[in-house]
Image (spheres, grey):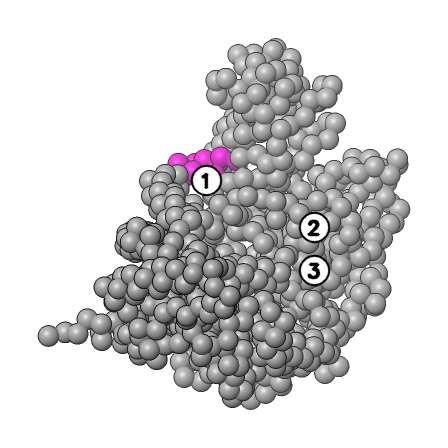
Amino acid sequence: MINLRKLLSNPLIYVTILATAVLICFGRTLGSYFLADDFGEVAYVSKIFEGDWARLWSNFTGNYMQVPSMAVYRPWLLMTLFFDYSIWKTNAAGYYATNLLHYLACTILIFTLVRLLTSYWGKLRSNLAATFSGLLFAVNPLHCESVSWVVGRVDIVCLTYYLLGLVSVALYVRNQNKKWLILTFASFWLGILTKEMAIALPVTATVLAFLWAKPVGSQNPKSNVLNFQPDENSQEASQLGNVTDGGTSEPSRATALAALQKLDQELQAQHSSLTASSESPSPAIAKPIASPANLSGTPSSNSPSSTPVSPLSPSILMEKIKVTVPVAGMLFACTVVYFIIRYAALGTITGGYTGSIGDSQISGILQKWTDLDTISRILFPFNQFVFADDTAHKTMLTVLYVALTALAGARLLVGATPRRWLVFLFFATVAVLAPIYQLWGIGYNLEGSRFVFFLTVPLSMLFPIILFAPLERRGSASESATANKTLNGAGIKIVALSVLALVGLTAAYAKTTLRNNIPWVHAGKQTDAITKKAQALSKSTPDGSLVCVVGIPKDEGGAHMILNGTTFRHLITPPFAGPGLTGKILTFEPVLFGNPEKIDTAHFKQALKLKDLRAFYVWDMDKKDFVPFDPGASPVVPQPFRIPLSSGQTKETDQSSSDMLTGSLASFPYTRQRGDVDAKGLVENANAGLGIRVSGLKLRPAAFDYMVINCKLPGNSTFRGTKCKVHIESTDGKKTDFESDFFVNDESIRIPLSAYWRFYAAGELASIVVDLPPISELAVDGVALLPDSFVAPTITAVGRHSSNEGSFAVDNRLNNPKSPGSSKSSKTRAVVEGGASPSTENKAVTIAVNATSLKDAQSIEVQVLRKNFFFDNFTSEAALINGTEQTFNTTGNIATVNLPAKLFTSSGYIQLRARALNGAKQQTGEYSAPITLRVLTD
């Protein structure tokens, strides 16, 4: 017959439960593929195995992988990838297995830590608290980004060592064996060299050591007294079958009741003795009173063999400090050494994201920390892409939270107040929040949830710790005897209900995690398909020919895919593909990060003019394949297209013009309740927004760039929004929708359609509908479709060719090697990988700007951003000003600007753009599409 107590005492049971929970929630991740940064990091490690050992050493002496947009020191993270690559090469399943093993280690370490620090509760309570703490962490729906993304392991690996450090400190304070501090030392360094979050370990470890330090010679305390040893005096111990760490059974309920009756008898005898002493000259000497703990053979604090000492007495405090000092001294000394190493490697002790991304994070700190949506997403972690407006799951979680909060309140009221645990969890929470002060915030689809990965540890412990903490004995023994039966009965019921509520919360979390993880698994399926199709496309493209690819998916449902053109290039280069596949595919993605709907317009316009261009393709996520499309040819002579205007039922009659597009018509409003229009085109009461429809086009997208609405905004009339919705229907009936910026001045509204890849991928256009934001009044005079030269200056780097990803290289390396993708055999190739023609890459950087088609252009201003700042990442005009390195002003509508050499002394990306100014130094038209310089230095 199975011995249930022996079975529940076996730690393998709990490890099996935790492992099962992890596999249920994240087992499908093993079938996923690399995502986003994974490709670049695996490719980087592969170069080390090819003999470039300097890359490995560079991660110990400088920035992680020399990433231009970050300043982080994480050499051990690279080592985990190094070990994986040595075994798995490009088999993604092996990398995800490493993630899952570390994640399981985290859950087991949480279980171990709670079990160690609650051992004085008795085994059943301790095991319940530890198991549910580990389970709630294992099934937390916020963990998909960390587990199901290979490089998301940075948090998992770091947390593994962080928790191992806390466990080793818990073992140290238990018996003050300093061998455990060696493990603490190693854990800190492995953790901090993986991610900066381990900086919280010195604080949490010090607090833990102080709270649970056992002064030499101290006796077993009552529940929740600041000590470590098991408590035999807990009122609920007997009812729950607790066993102390030493293996001695605690008194049964019958034994405890008998002991309490004996206490009452002794109290009565002592009372009689004291009464008699009042009439006797000799002083009364009280007899020591027995306690239930004495019945189990353990000295109590009231016995003559022990000397009762206040937990807050100076002697106890000094003893605790003596235990804590070795932990705090070692860890804070290591922290100082780490900061010295970090400063030597990075030139800063802070770091994190740099450039425009870092600036935007800092500028929005106050707004992010006061945004209650993040708190809501931590409590209700539903990926909006998956759950949409599903209120049933939110209601279910709300009910569970209310039930658990009520049970926790009841526990606290009846005396289960785990004071030192509450203090520890408070400091643990603050310690893990401090390093993410710039990164606080979670998106609608739980983007950025990895940043609160450490925070979920104390949150996972909170309910189990409060709900399973044993009751304290309050008042005198006689009072305890009176209340004992009632309190213990209520306590057992609360524990039983707590188990049910926590099982419900675990199940709800697990179900949510399974669904939240779906976008990540599907994203892996997409990147796997993109990799195979891109390789096939490159193989099928003849040498000397080029193809263009747009619509490469950046993310879906919060799951990252192919971030930029550089990431895409990794798909068709070793180690993911064989040699000889690069140099044939042009991409138009953001340099590092940016709006996934936008493309590099200047690069695309240049590609349209290439003679060796073979075809255009767009990625179809449903078909998981590249689908061809025809954007049309770049016009030899750009020309505007004026659209006849129809407002309401009245057509304008005097709109004949040589550039009028025959058969087309612009009408507004195109739906009901979108404003009232009079015969002169004045729109009023457009409180639901203004829609303008241009029909009868039969134009290819390459023929124009902007939709311009000539209008006037009377009085103080302004649009209540900064984005408009664009709906396109092609001549074959295909419909395309996207959201666009729009620009307004006193004369027109300009919508940059060609800044978005969906515009080009639509094919031959039949109609365009633009939904503008609400406005009170607007006078529309006409609509036109204009090439960009009529709206903004054109800008280019003189004598330089852009890379396949769109940037112009400025190679200032001493050895000046040829671009890695250049090909001597491809004579017709106008675009080379890596970014520069070998004959021009070392020459001075000259920028040419042309604004001859712009009305009233009298001068030109070129705006150059600071290194690794990008126009798409700015969130305010103030941030843009702060991110500007320099501006250059010239007279005339044609300009040539030589950029100073000081801009190119360090590696990184430099973005610039130009605008035309009239005689009053006011902007005319719009800014040009930006171009990017990639600076390469030793």
- Can residue 775 be seen in the rendering of this structure? yes
Name the residue tied to disc 2. 363
Quadrant of the rendered image containing residue 665: top right
User: Residue 385, how many percent across, how many down?
Assistant: 41, 46
In the visual, does 261 lie left or right of 689? left
Quadrant assignment, res 724: top right
Residue 681: mark: none
The one of 158 and 256 positioned closer to us in this rendering: 256
Q: Main secondary structure of the magenta part?
A: strand
Q: Can residue 206 be seen in this view?
A: no
Question: Dot 1: what SS?
Answer: strand
Which of 330 and 92 lies nearest the eye of the viewer? 330
Q: In which quarter of the image is residue 833?
A: bottom right
Residue type indicated by callout 3: Gly
Q: Circle 3 sits on which residue?
A: 355
Are there few (<14), some (14-19), or many (20+) residues within 10 Å of tag 2? some
387 or 618, which lies in front? 387
What segment is highlighted magenta in the picture? 726-737
